Image (spheres, rainbow, N blue to C red):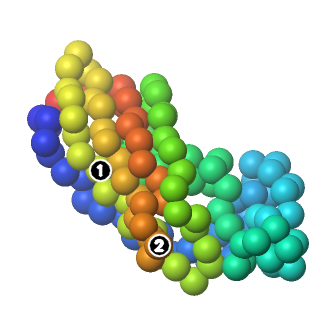
Amino acid sequence: MKAGDELPELTVPITRTLIVAGALASRDYQDVHHDTEAAAEKGSPDIFMNILTTNGLVGRYLTDHFGPRCVLRKVAIRLGAPNYPRDTMVLRGTVTDVADGTAVVRVVGANGLGHHVTGTVTVSLPEGTE
């Protein structure tokens, strides 16, 4: 592995169930993540995914690639376009640095509206991965 290597993409269907389950699992009870009418009253066309669910999906993307023994050391992400039900998010990653058993990966998750999530993740790699 070296800087410039691209990770295989991960396609995530954005379902109403995923959005609500992610909010519940992360104890985020804000109505915009489970109540369509409340979301509409606040100007949103539908419920939308919370950042903690997105963070979990980014983590899954990297552990799916590097394996269950990798350790996420730093996750620095920013949200952009909301993830609404009936859309799809495609996660892509590019290795930007590899040194001393650690990789830094630039991650972008895009949906039909644009970039939902962008950022970098620093991962400690299992022995023999470099």
Picture quadrant where residue 36 is located:
bottom right
At a point 13% along the width and 42% down the height, the residue shown is 4
At a point 30% along the width and 62% down the height, the residue shown is 9
Residue 92, given in percent of the width and then of the height, sits at 31, 57
Which mark's residue is nearer the viewer, 2 or 1? 2
Other residues around mark 2 within 10 Å, as few (<14) / some (14–19) / many (≥20): few
Q: Amino acid at mark 2?
A: Leu
Q: Quadrant of the N terminus?
A: top left
Q: Is residue 12 visible?
A: yes
**Does residue 23 sit above or below 63 in this rendering?**
below
Q: Quadrant of the C terminus?
A: top left
Disc 2 to disc 1, C-alpha distance: 19 Å
Which residue has dot 2 on it?
113
**Residue found at the very far top of the displayed protein:** 100
Q: In the image, 95: left or right of 85?
A: left
Q: In the image, 50: left or right of 25?
A: left
Does dot 1 land on a helix, a strand or a loop? strand
**Residue found at the very far front of the displayed protein:** 43
Does dot 2 land on a helix, a strand or a loop? loop
Residue 51, given in percent of the width and then of the height, sits at 63, 50
Q: Between disc 2 and disc 1, whose residue precedes? A: 1
Q: Amino acid at mark 1?
A: Gly
**Residue found at the very far bottom of the displayed protein:** 86
Q: Is residue 64 visible?
A: no
Q: In the image, 56: left or right of 101?
A: right
Q: Which mark is residue 32?
A: none
Which residue has dot 1 on it?
93
At a point 57% along the width and 83% down the height, the residue shown is 86
Residue 15, given in percent of the width and then of the height, sits at 62, 77
At a point 49% along the width and 60% down the height, the residue shown is 116
Q: In the image, 47: left or right of 100?
A: right
Residue 40, given in percent of the width and then of the height, sits at 80, 77
